[in-house]
Image (cartoon, helix red, strand yellow):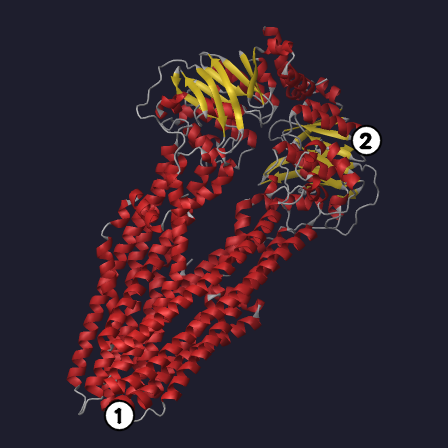
Amino acid sequence: MKRSVTTGALIRRALVEAPSLTVGLRLTLGMAMAGQAITVITPILIQILIDSEILDEGAVDIGNVFFLGVMAVLALSVGVVVGRISLLRLVNTSSTGLSDLRTKTFGHIMDQSVLHVQSERRGNLLSRVTSDITTLQEFMEWGGVGMIIAGSQVVLATTVMMFYEWRLALIAIVGVLLYLLMMRWFQRILSRNYDAVRVEVGRSLGVLSESITAVPVVRAYGVEDSTKEKVGEALERRFRVEFKTFRFGNILYSTAEIFAGLLTAVLIVAGVLIGVEVGTTAGTLIAFLFLTNLLIEPMQILVETLEFAQSAASGLRRVVEVLDDEIDVVEADNPESLRPGGLSAAFDHVHYCYPDGPEVLTDINVDIPVGSRVAVVGETGSGKTTFAKLLVRLMDPSEGVVRIGGVNATQISFEDLRSRTAFVPQEGFLFDDTVANNVRYGRIEADDAEVWTAFHELGLGEWVQGLPKGMDTMVGERGGNLSAGERQLVALVRSWIGTPDLLVLDEATSAVDPALDVALRHAIDKLTEGRTSVTIAHRLSTAEGADEVLVFDQGRLVERGHHRDLVEAGGVYSSLYSDWTAGTKSV
Amino acid sequence: MTPWSVLRDGTRLIKRFVGMHPGAFSLAVLGAALYAGAIIASSWVIGWSTDEVIIPVLDRGEDPDLLGMAAAAVLGVAAVKGGAIILRRTSAAYMTGSTRRDLRNELLAHMLTLRMSWFNRQAIGDLLAVADADTDQGTGVLGPLPYATGVSLLLVGTIALISTIDIWLGVGAVVGLLTAIVIDVRGSWITFGMWEEVQKGRGKVASIAHESFDGALTVKALGRENFVSNKFGVASDELRDRIITVNSTWTKYQVIIRALPQFLIIVLLIVGAVRISADVVTPGDIVTVAYLLTLLAFPIQLIGFVLWDLAGALAGWRRVESVLDATDYMDWGEDSASSKTDPAPVTGKTVGFAYDDEAVLEDLNLNLGAGTTLAVVGPTASGKSTLGLLLARLWDPDDGTIHLEGRDLRRFARSELPKEVSYVSQNAFLFDGTVRQNVTLDSEFSETEVQRALRLAGADRFVSELPDGLDTQLGERGTTLSGGQRQRLALARALIRKPRLMILDDATSAVDPSVEAEILKALKSAELPSTIVVVAYRPSSIRLADEVVYVDSKRILAHGKHDDLLESEPGYARLVKAYEDEAARLRDAS
């Protein structure tokens, strides 16, 4: 459905988002065109010189020649100044407009839940704010300028031609149109061939990047030779297809030169033969040959920038598509605030299914009272994480209502929602900054002492002191300088420093060792006394100490109650638990 | 990079590329020379037609005798020009394409000769970029290079032709063209540093976006969308300002360069008209000169870009070179693997290993009998995984030696050690191929062997439920499977090889506990022909082991039977019994 959107509509849409793109555009274009008038000065000067001085009876009037020269130089200078101003204006508007568009797109993407739901789309979204915008920028700076210049040159040259001799002008225009058609036809054939190239490029890069990523496996299994062979074959195939296409393209492009030569030859023949009849001057015909040159090159530029324009248009289309994607989790128009104090949570007939996907949660009904400690257990893929994300409104249910503190989660102000609840995901994502600054993402105004206290409260003071530069240690890109378990510790402190009233931990300590895991659990329990905490538990020791255990199986809440009672009931939980005890029994 | 260093290093780079394909380069330059010749010839033909056809017929009313010849000459020159373009562009394409292909093969081959320690210091994304965009960028100069050569020849030819017509016109042309080139080069010289700033700005914008999107869940959970959006906006505006700055300088030069040939033509026309009146030159001569300069106007604008092309190529090439120049070679020995099929004993003597100058393992001694199953246990970041990597010789110890059945691991020739040792990590890597290919890695194994390995790894059931069973295509990185399923296939990949030593580094971490228990039971009862080393936390894995080493603070603190260690090592007991003790405490509390 979005396919049918025309380029014009795309541009209009982009202008709505970044109105700064249009500021003074008409004047800029007019000036660019005026600046381009410098190119027709030469042919006109040649015609005048030849007809009225050189071939004129009598001696050349040196004074007049110099006068003409000075006039031409003056015209040229004016054109340069006007052209410069128009270029500057163009760069200013396009840079400003595109920066606005980029920031707007980024903000829009950040508001989408699609980012964490479908991680495979992240790469695509990244190109929306980087390469797509860069393509647009480059198009505006080079392609756009090229098109304006080429376009105005064609208009000016044909105008001058018509003024000199309309019959020859018609020949030139028809010739140029034929040429244009021919180039378009070539472009189409070529872009079909380029599709095949793109496929091979993608394939070879896929094989190559897989092999590089797999170097440890290749080494561990000693399959270096077959890996090199596989990559070599893919690269060779790509080279053959690319070369074949380029060779073909070069032959097509070279015909353009022959066509240009043909047009020039025809103009000479026609000019000489007709000229005798209608009284064309030698100067006029020579000026025509120059003007024809002014036509051919812009055509080449126009056709090439047309491809450029197409890729810019599809870049713009992708950007606009992102902007058009409705934000799925939006703040209510008149948001409510939460009452101070502890927070309860409730699910009322909640269903969730991914867009075009199967239902992952079915009819969940649960009340979590203020101050309770709840553990959520279940096998991989049972819907635990979805439950946790719905609980803090990182997503909205497909059906049913989630309430926090008695208020429908969709009606709570974002400010309250994010400051009163905390969600700690399993991944322990860290930003490329210091440990302390990472913690500050949880509360931006926290000073060093407060950050330090937060580590201390969770019993991690010793650990953070053991780091090379303590809290000022840089964690590296994605926290790469720390181990997975250590990253989880920082993520935990980061959520903790926001003093949430509802704390949701999604296997937030899965990568730390058992002894530390138990110690952290104790610290969290002590600190969350009186507050509500929900823990997605990989390790059932958490469930044993919880006030209530929720057991998920295939998207349904199948059991709930205290650990003791669930073990006795002999259902899903009791079998999970016996696996767990068998697994953790040391003797 | 300064412009000078760009010129110096760029010349070196070009020499290297030309040396790789001298034949194709010569053909491309020949094409460029022909092209320059054809352009000069076409101007001469137009001038000749002016003097011999256009003026005699239109001005003096003579018969158009030579008209056919003029038309034929114009067409002939155009044909040569077309042929020259084909020759130049096709040779350049061949040169670029084959250089890229060779470089990529070389990159992979080189990476495969390097130590894993080198590999671990690199970000995978960077290595992929080197093999993809950086290689393209680094060789990007190969396309424009023959063209630039052609333009240089064209300049020389132009000056020569104009000088033969009239020495004063020639002097004018030299002065004019040199001025154009100087201004052109100066423009790109001055804006050079500014462009680098723009590139840096782009990098910053991209990395903020990358980080924010990767950590989206965290950003949203903390409600920091506005914080990162502002950060992004600041970087974006900074980029905008840099682009505007560089362009306000660049456009100044750009318009001058575009206007200069026009200016030169006007001057030469005036001088020419004066010289005609002195009967030194013909009208056709100044038409030739003007026509030639018109044709030169576009190529001359491109001279300044050579510096850009070079700088861009160098930036890409530096990153390619940093990989190709890495010398952390893996030293292979000469020995072949043994053909024995029984378990092999392992010994480690005074083994030490440091990562980034930080000791990870120190003075570690290990004696493991043939057929033993050993569990390696220790707290977070204690060096357990490193031990596994050293035993498989994915890394080499900095001190001490490791022997497999009396043979130093470093004495094995390339690809020989994996015939006796299999290593399975927590990150199960699957190739884009079928289930079968992923298990066999294209070695010869019978159907029964494949089935047996899958069964042992607890993967038989889900594989049989896949649409095409063993022949199901897994897609890139096996994304269609769950983490636990991927780990089980990776385990089968090791088991099918019946290794004499098998190392499992938390290899079942993503498998559900009940399934894991089954797998471990199956492995225990299968009586594998392997010595097994398991890096694990879970007491269930530990209990299946014959022996345990307890690693903490970079050393093996104890080696013995699990029950004995529970008695003698309080740290070990605390770690292993953490959950059990917790359960007991909770029972007591209630």
Left or right position of B85 against A416: right
Identity of the amino acid at label 2?
A: Glu
Which chain is disc 1 placed on?
B
- Indicate the quadrant where residue A258 lies: bottom left
Report how far apart the C-alphas of labels 1 and 2 lie in the structure. Answer: 109 Å
Residue found at x 46% / y 77%: B33
Q: Position of residue B270 (x, y in %)?
A: 23, 82
Q: Are marks 1 and 2 in contact (CB under 8 Å)?
A: no
Q: Position of residue B583 (x, y in %)?
A: 62, 13
Quadrant of the image occupied by residue A157 = bottom left
From this viewpoint, is residue B200 visible? no
Q: Nearer the viewer, residue A369 or B579?
A: A369
| Horizontal relation, residue B98 to residue B160: left or right | right
Depicted B293 relative to depicted A566: above or below: below
Q: Which residue is mark 1?
A: B61
Q: Are marks 1 and 2 on the same chain?
A: yes
- The residue indicated by pointer 2 is B527
Helix or strand or loop: what does disc 2 sit on?
loop
Task: Indicate the secondary structure of the residue bearing disc 1.
Answer: loop
* N-terminal label among 1 and 2: 1
* Amino acid type, callout 1: Gly
Which quarter of the rendering shows the N terminus of chain B? Answer: bottom left
- Which quadrant holds residue B117? top right
Report the front residue among B488 and A408.
A408
- Crowd class of label 2 (few under 14; some 14 to 19; many from 20; radius 10 Å): few
Q: Position of residue A57 (x, y in %)?
A: 18, 91
The residue positioned 60% from the left and 17% from the top of the image is A541
A469 vs B147: above or below: above
